[in-house]
Amino acid sequence: MGERRVALITGITGQDGSYLSELLLEESYEVHGIVRRSSTERFERIASFKDRLTLHQADLLDQLSLVDVIRQVRPTEIYNLAAQSFVPTSWRQPLLTGEFTALGVTRVLEAVRLVDPGIRFYQASSSEMFGNSPPPQGERTPFSPRSPYGVAKVYGHFITVNYRESYGVFAVSGILFNHESPRRGKEFVTRKVTDAVARIKLGVADELRLGNLEARRDWGYAPDYVRAMWGMLQQREPGDYVIATGVQHTVRQLVECAFGVAGLDWRRHVRSDPSLIRPAEVDSLLGDPTRSRDRLGWKPRVGFEEMVRLMVEADMDRVAAEAHAGARA
């Protein structure tokens, strides 16, 4: 009889949750996911393997629902990926962002403490916590968040450290820099760009409006990053890790690359829109992945250009399929 391996994932319907689910299924886990009590929950990202998952209704705002699910599932590992994670929305809804992205972490950790402190816990921290701290940013770099989202993530990060130190919970935080894929939401700049490229190429749009083209980010490929999440919970001792490529690009370079995949001149289609500039901009994020490389043996497999190409091609296939379906309707 093999060791029981049961994972519970919050945010299972999101980009990271879907890729992590696939990885854990490959590793012979029993995989459970938490979905919110909502009539608008979307399952597109997990549709192809949803029959191999067990989904439960609960909410990061409802402590009792989390306790009930953990008691029912008895997971060996919990991955807390759920959050209000779109930075611009955090200025419009700062209180909601705090409830989900900060206090929500505490509710899950408290449920772990009450039900079974032996559960291994992963918290999805974010490079947005670094804000204006000069690059490169590593595990010892001071946090200087520049958005309500970044502030909330700092709380979530330190409450995870606190439960590790106070209660002995095997609790870790992965400080993930930007990671993208064809499953990324269209509100995020990478997917906004690749979706626009596909629409322009196929003649259903003509322009793309963007804010700060000079913002610099460390972009990686999401399926690579979920391997690091899993790896952190397989270590002998809990610890926090920066997960990044160590390579930086500007939004302008992202745009050039994406339009180039489609054989288009980006300067003919991209417009600067001051209304899309953040109230407090994070100018430069660049991760130092030394610790994750040395201790986890982790390194990215897919580079920036290949990632952008995969995203543009996936969006072109999708837009073409939508146009074909519309023509038949």
Image (spheres, rainbow, N blue to C red):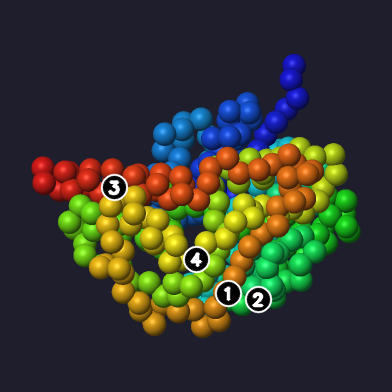
Q: CA distance from mark 4 to mark 3?
A: 23 Å
Mark earlier in primary sequence (1, 3): 1
Mark earlier in primary sequence (4, 3): 4
Above-or-below relation of 211 to 14:
below
Question: Where does label 1 land, which residue?
Answer: 282
Above-or-below relation of 220 to 23:
below
Question: Where does label 2 land, which residue?
Answer: 132
Query: Toward the viewer: 220 or 54?
Result: 220
Write the residue at 66% across / 59% down: 287
| Viewer-side label of 4, 2 | 4
Above-or-below relation of 241 to 314:
below
Mark earlier in primary sequence (1, 4): 4
Contact (Cβ within 8 Å) of mark 2 with mark 1? yes
Q: Secondary structure at mark 3?
A: helix
Is residue 114 something that shows in the picture? no
Q: Position of residue 252 (x, y in %)?
A: 43, 66
Mark earlier in primary sequence (4, 2): 2
Q: CA distance from mark 2 to mark 1?
A: 6 Å
Q: Secondary structure at mark 1?
A: loop
Q: CA distance from mark 1 to mark 3?
A: 30 Å
Mark 1: few/some/many CA within 10 Å (<14, 14-19, 20+): some
Question: Where does label 4 land, which residue?
Answer: 250
Mark earlier in primary sequence (3, 2): 2
Query: Toward the viewer: 316 or 149?
Result: 316
Mark 4: few/some/many CA within 10 Å (<14, 14-19, 20+): some
Tag 1: residue type? Answer: Val
Q: Secondary structure at mark 4?
A: strand
